Image (cartoon, rainbow, N blue to C red):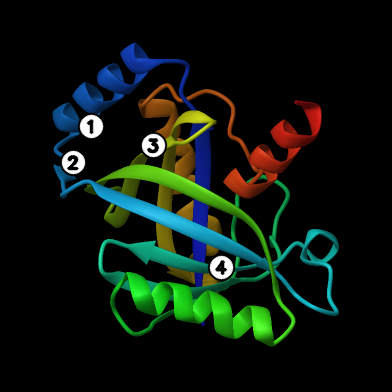
Amino acid sequence: MSLEVEMKYSLADAAAVTALRMKLAALGAEPAEPLHQRDVYLAHPSRDFAQTDEAFRIRCVGEENYLTYKGPLLDEVTKTRHEIEIATAAGAGACEQLLDMFTRLGFRAVRDVVKRREPFFLLWQDRDVEIVLDDVRDLGWFAELEIIAEVSECDAARECLFALSRELNLGKSERRSYLRLLLEQDVSA
């Protein structure tokens, strides 16, 4: 079984984003086309995902749509968890139909997370690492480092991400999800 091993970092400002892009280029990271993503997070009708540390969302990326389940976090430092993502019918209409279907099944839309994502791919310590720079609406810039690893390789994958984060001078990681950060911000506003 594969797990998503991820670390996320808040970036102070546009200058920090530019500096990180330059560091990634110097390390040989390959950029991919930027994406616009809308994630609609859903609350289960009889289970409190905030208590179980799970998430369920509809992700709309251009014409592509995905259903994603994220299981509970498995350690105290990184955002390592089981993730299942399934592509669904394409198009904006299909995204709205998915939301309608889940609403009729008792799910409730919690909040949208909208972001512009810049993906990069890097071979680091013999591991394929995806690095993304996210400009999250109402939150600002973040960097995420991610490796997909088998359970038996999770410790090594975490160490790889720690080493890369040190190389990139990313500072302290942020374990809260974008959804959690936005909901906390909404409450304090």
Which quarter shows the C terminus?
top right
Three-letter code for the amino acid on which mark 2 is drawn = Ala
110 sits to left or right of 29: right
Where residue 37 appears, as percent x and y from the top left, is 37, 54
Q: Which residue is mark 3?
A: 164
Name which quarter of the figure residue 128 lies in.
Answer: bottom left
Residue drawn at the location 33% of the way across and 85% of the way down:
89
Type of residue at label 4?
Answer: Arg
Cα–Cα gap, marks 1 and 4? 30 Å
Choose the circle earlier in sequence order: 2 or 1.
Answer: 1
Percent x, y for residue 77? 67, 45
**As drawn, 177 above or below 23:** below
* Rendered position, 21 above or below 159: above
> Where does label 4 land, which residue?
57
Distance in Å between CA atoms under marks 4 and 2: 29 Å
The answer to whether the residues at label 1 and label 4 have Cβ atoms under 8 Å apart is: no
In primary-sequence order, the first of circles 4 and 2 is 2
First reached walking from the N terminus: tag 3 or tag 1: 1
Pointer 2 with pointer 1, Cβ within 8 A = yes
Give neighbour class at mark 4: few <14, some 14-19, many 20+ (Cα, 10 Å): many
Kind of residue sitting beneath label 1: Leu
Q: Looking at the image, can residue 2 be seen? A: no
| Quadrant of the image occupied by residue 19 | top left
Taking depth in this image into account, of 27 and 104 the one nearest to the observer is 104
At 66% across and 70% down in the image, what residue appears? 71
Q: Check whether the beta carbons of the residues at disc 2 and disc 3 lie within 8 A of each other.
A: no
- Identify residue for label 2: 29
Q: For marks 2 and 3, give the one nearer the viewer.
A: 2
Query: How dense is the environment of label 1, judged by Cα within 10 Å: few (below 14), some, or many (20 and up)?
Result: some
Residue 24 has which mark? 1
In this rendering, the label closer to the viewer, 3 or 1: 1
